[in-house]
Image (tube, grey):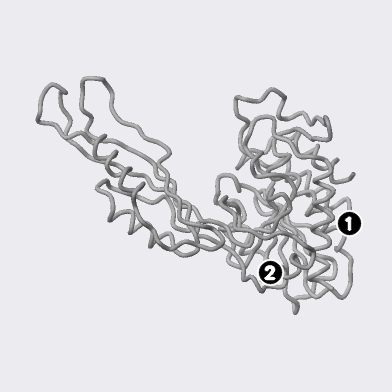
Amino acid sequence: MEALEILTKLIVTPSFSGEEDGTAKILEKELVDNGIYCQRIHNNVWAKNLNYDPSKPSILLNSHHDTVKPNKGYTLDPFVPKISEGKLFGLGSNDAGGCLVALLETFKFFYAEKNLKYNLIFAATAEEENSGEKGIRSLLPTLPDISFAIVGEPTNLKLAVAEKGLMVIDACSNGIAGHVAHTNTVNPIEIAMNDIQSLKELILDRVSDLLGPVKITCTQITAGTAHNVVPSTCNFVIDVRVNECYSNQELFEIIDQATESKLKARSFRLNSSGISLDHPIVTGAENLGIETYGSPTLSDQANLTCPSVKIGPGSSLRSHKADEFIYVDEIEEGIKTYTELLKEILK
């Protein structure tokens, strides 16, 4: 399989977020070797179909070629592709290399087709894992107008028609430092604990049919320098997964009112995203018997300004885990699914 060969080349080449030059060159070469003119912005590589017509709407086929760094649990070399028992092991194989090469092969399949109802734009993008400034957001102003997007992420080839947004909040509770033996102190750790408990008990009654309730989780906390000193501050981090019933700004104000600590959101831009259930891409998926669902995980959909869906081979549960892998036949099935789905739209 040509897709498998490309994926093994990508695995061999480290491509941590912001360091994707090597994999960008591999993707450029693959497109050029197939007679496809492509362009590059930073480490984002993109191309239009041969018979691109500016009077027609365009579909964006997008996935990312950056990876997280391998964790300490790896027992295999993350940069040595290995096939065993039908699995291709390697960093980025599942998230999102399998999706990327399957979308690339699909784009190549339709590249020279005439009389398509839509243009096709393929974009292999960088800095997805860290939502970096030089990722898809830096590419979007260069692209033609996009009618809607298919984002390649591992979903077991189910169609995500909605995706939760993300807001990360840095919180700081302030106290009065002093020796623990005295009573003239105010413990910021206790203030933080009360705030965290308040967030656990916070009632957010707008529950999405697709994405469920908003999920608020404290994921980091730091305070203190010695066992016998009450610290002056306690810092903690709040991870908020947002459904489409709230904007990030609105939710921040609700959380701010429910807590005593000083809060600062890192960004408000990663709102929930999705697509109308009567959109042609959704009805096309239903015609093919593809299951639809709402996704709890974030992707580059959050950076798009057009309607979008998320679908791809592989499983989200394998992403960022040690000894990451994708089944070889999942890649083949991914190409088939992408191709059949687009035929429903392009015919």
Q: Left or right? Give the position of 254 relative to 208.
A: left
Q: Earlier in the sequence, mark 2 or mark 1?
A: 1
Res 186 quadrant in image: top left
Q: Nearer the viewer, residue 4 or 145?
A: 4
Lateral position of residue 8 relative to residue 165, left or right: right
In the image, is residue 14 above or below residue 135? above
Residue 306 against residue 262 in the figure, above or below: below
Query: 59 or 259: which is nearer to us?
Result: 259
Q: What residue lies at 63% left-to-right and 34% top-to-bottom?
A: 321
Pointer 2: what residue?
A: 144
* Type of amino acid under label 2: Pro
Q: Is residue 85 above or below residue 95?
A: above
- Left or right: 181, with 101 as reference point: left
Q: Residue at x 73, y 39 (%)?
A: 93
* Whole-percent x, y for residue 19 in the image: 63, 39
Task: Return the mark for residue 35.
Answer: 1
Measured as percent of width and height from the top left, residue 288 is found at 80, 64
Q: Is 230 located above or below residue 26 in the figure?
A: above
x then y, percent, for residue 345:
78, 71
Circle 1 residues within 10 Å: few <14, some 14–19, many ≥20 = few
Could you tell me which secondary element the residue under label 1 belongs to?
loop
Which part of the image, by quadrant, shows the C terminus?
A: bottom right
Most extreme residue toward the bottom is 55
Please indicate whether residue 190 sits to the left or right of residue 201 in the image.
left
- Please name the amino acid that badge 1 sits on: Gly
Q: Identify the element where label 2 is drawn.
A: loop
Quarter of the image holding residue 145?
bottom right
Residue 276 locus on image (x, y percent): 62, 71
Disc 2 crowd rating (10 Å Cα; few below 14, some 14-19, many 20+) is: few
